[in-house]
Amino acid sequence: MNQEDKEKDYFESPIHLEYQYTAGAATTRFLNKVKEGKLVGQECPKCKAVYVPPRGSCPRDGIATNREVELVDQGCIESFTIVHIPIPGNPIVPPYVCAMIRLDGANISFLHLVDGIKLTDIRIGMRVKAVWKPKSEWRHSLENIKWFIPTDEPDVDVTKLRFKPE
Ligand SMILES: [Zn+2]
């Protein structure tokens, strides 16, 4: 083994995989709304938690969530990471921010990109809003949202977002 081989900790190998994803009833309804530019969660009839994206049931109570709740496309950063290492096949060039976004009125967060801010200024609790792609590009995907950008609103104390069932 020569020195060049010792320095490699991976190798590239062409591979092609095809996936078929069955979304299920709740996610299908959610993605149909996303295609219309709406973010619609579901509320648990017992504890009133709002899940977005919805999965069709409340993991706390083990019952179906069937009441739909339309949410605004803004919220706050619940947590984040700054990605510095390129991911093979990912067209996004580092560094960039991946954050857990908690929409206003939701009780869970989802992963998305944050842009429009210096990396050193990103912080937990920062208020953000969605930047949507042009409507002509909308499909059944949260990628209809390009990323979230900061608003000028005061930060949120995320410790107060902890869920307390009614
Ligand atoms: Zn519940």
Image (spheres, rainbow, N blue to C red):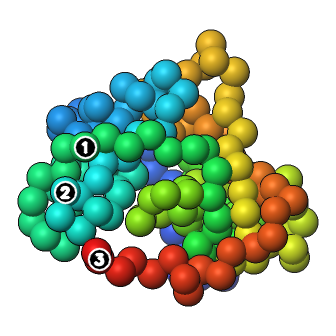
Which label sits on residue 67? Answer: 1
Amino acid type, residue under disc 2 in the picture: Pro
User: Of label 1 and label 2, which has the lower sequence position?
Assistant: 2
- Do the residues under discs 1 and 2 have CB atoms within 8 angstroms? yes
Decide if ligand 1 comes within 8 Å of the CB at mark 2. yes
Would residue 110 be visible to someone looking at this image?
Answer: no
Taking depth in this image into account, of 83 and 120 the one nearest to the observer is 120
Looking at the figure, which quarter contains the C terminus?
bottom left
Decide if ligand 1 comes within 8 Å of the CB at mark 3. yes
For residue 121, side relative to residue 129 (left or right): right
Disc 1 from disc 2: Cα separation = 8 Å
- Do the residues under discs 2 and 3 have CB atoms within 8 angstroms? no
Residue 73 spot, x, y in % from top left: 60, 44
Would residue 152 be visible to someone looking at this image?
Answer: yes
Residue 132 spot, x, y in % from top left: 67, 33
Q: How many marks on residues? A: 3
Name the image quarter holding residue 16.
top left
Taking depth in this image into account, of 166 and 131 the one nearest to the observer is 166
Rendered view: 36 above or below 34: above
User: Of label 1 and label 3, which has the lower sequence position?
Assistant: 1
Helix, strand or loop under label 2: loop
Tag 3: Cα neighbours inside 10 Å, few (<14), some, or many (≥20)?
few
Amino acid type, residue under disc 1 in the picture: Arg
User: Of label 2 and label 3, which has the lower sequence position?
Assistant: 2
Residue bearing mark 3? 165
Residue 11 spot, x, y in % from top left: 51, 62
Helix, strand or loop under label 3: loop
Helix, strand or loop under label 1: strand
Residue bearing mark 2? 45
